[in-house]
Image (cartoon, rainbow, N blue to C red):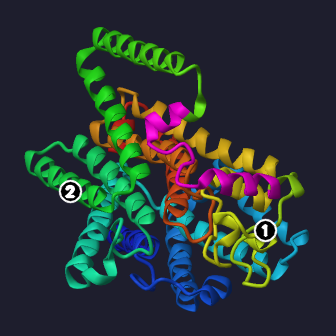
Amino acid sequence: MPGGFSRFLHSLLTYGFLFYTFIGTNPIDYRPLAERVDGNPASRVVVLVLLALAVVVAWTNRSALVPCLKANVGLFAVVGFCLASVLWSPFPDLALRRAVFQILVTGVAVGIAVGVTDLRRFHTAIFIGMMTVVACNFLAVAAWPSLTIADNGVVGLYAQKNPAGAVAMIAVVCATTWTIGASRLQSTMVGLGGMALSALFLVLTNSKTSIGLAALALLIIAVFVLAEKGGPRFVLVVVFGALLALAGLLTVFAAIDFDNARLLEILFGDASFTGRDELWAFALRSCLERPWLGHGYGAFWDVGLTNDPLRSLEPGTWLGDVDPGIINQAHNGYLDLWLQIGLPATVVATLVVLAAALSAGRRALLRDLDRGARAALGMLAALLFLHLLHNSTEATLFARGVAFANLAILCILVTAQAQFLADAAPRGERSGAEG
């Protein structure tokens, strides 16, 4: 297949994946409970079409397919275990349908990853895709303000402000790293515009978690960029500043008699994390009912009104008084995945993401790569680390139908593909192979 047409198919697959992941088949409309249980037929059709295209792309890049499978054994083991959970799930039909769907999405991501031959080009595709998503959100806000603006912030094309904030956070990181990798003034200006647009959307969502994590990511990225230019002395200054900040935090902690709740209230304004502590306690109790294998992938929440797990709670607390079906996650991805596939598999899943993040971060620091490749690897590392942090308050780790989960799987696969490209490139030409 001609190279130009192959690249066209890969671009079509990449943008299709981003459109499905971040906009979906029913934007703005909040999915009713019945659809959350039975699934969306339109989404299945879209994913099957994308999978067919992914098969074609993977075939045209089949030399990278086997190395991809070998390098991502951990990832495929986790997804395979999700499917195996059908055997012990109390709702095997739901677990089967949801695990198979997750396998299909992973297959689409594999097709995209093995088709990556230039990290900068891939980074550009992600940048364009995310800026298009942000622009679509602004257009939706302008066209349907009553549907896209809630009392507590802008929700855009999403049901709540937190998913909107996560999308904006991802866009900010993509735009920032892409701008750093730009080699022309025109590209830099475009990147700065994308950063400003994404940051504006992030602020408008009023999602505190995403705003805080985005600020942390930008700070760390800035430190690495300045450290590269400032050398060892700058690194020492940063380390000294971090130690001072830690000493200040410990001083504050001592001043309040080492009261954890008080410290959390000072730092975050709410020691209960807007009531999440009660939900976390319930989730932990449910985890301990089946600690090793879980309740089955996708078979704890969204299992129908009759079987809603919160029905077991006595009325009298806000969690016990919530209408069945309203809450469909533990607001902690580690607890949520533990609920579904057990503690050992959750640990493996976490390590898979962490290993990919460390690998991408380490390679982003290599000076034998060109600027664009290093920026792309920096984006992969930043997104994967943010994924693990964001997962502490929102369930995203290998979560079904969640945008950040789909993107994280793609980032893991592309990180492995970057290593394949480096190994396949002749000595002295690695920068060109990945730039």
Disc marking residue 194? 2
Q: Is residue 281 magenta?
A: yes
- Percent x, y of residue 27: 40, 82
Q: What amino acid is found at the position of numbered circle 1 in the picture?
A: Glu
Label 1 vs label 2, nearer the camera: 1
* Few, some or many residues within 10 Å of mark 1 (<14, 14–19, 20+): few
Which residue: 56% across, 45% down? 388
How far from the left and from the top, in percent, is residue 182?
Answer: 20, 44
Mark 1 vs 2, N-terminal side: 2
- The kind of secondary structure element at disc 2 is helix
**Main secondary structure found in the magenta portion:** helix
Q: How many numbered marks have been drawn onto this rendered protein structure?
A: 2
Cα–Cα gap, marks 1 and 2: 49 Å
Which numbered tag is attached to residue 314? 1
**Which segment is the magenta one?**
262-286
As for residue 369 lying within the magenta part, the answer is: no
When the figure is inspected, residue 368 is found, relative to residue 247, above or below; the finding is: below
Q: Residues within 10 Å of mark 2 (few under 14, many from 20)?
A: many
Residue at left offset 48%, top offset 30%? 362
201, 410: nearer the viewer: 201
Please state which amino acid type lies under the numbered disc 2: Gly
- Residue lying at 43% horizontally and 57% vertically, measured from the top left: 116
Nearest to the observer: residue 59 or residue 260: 260
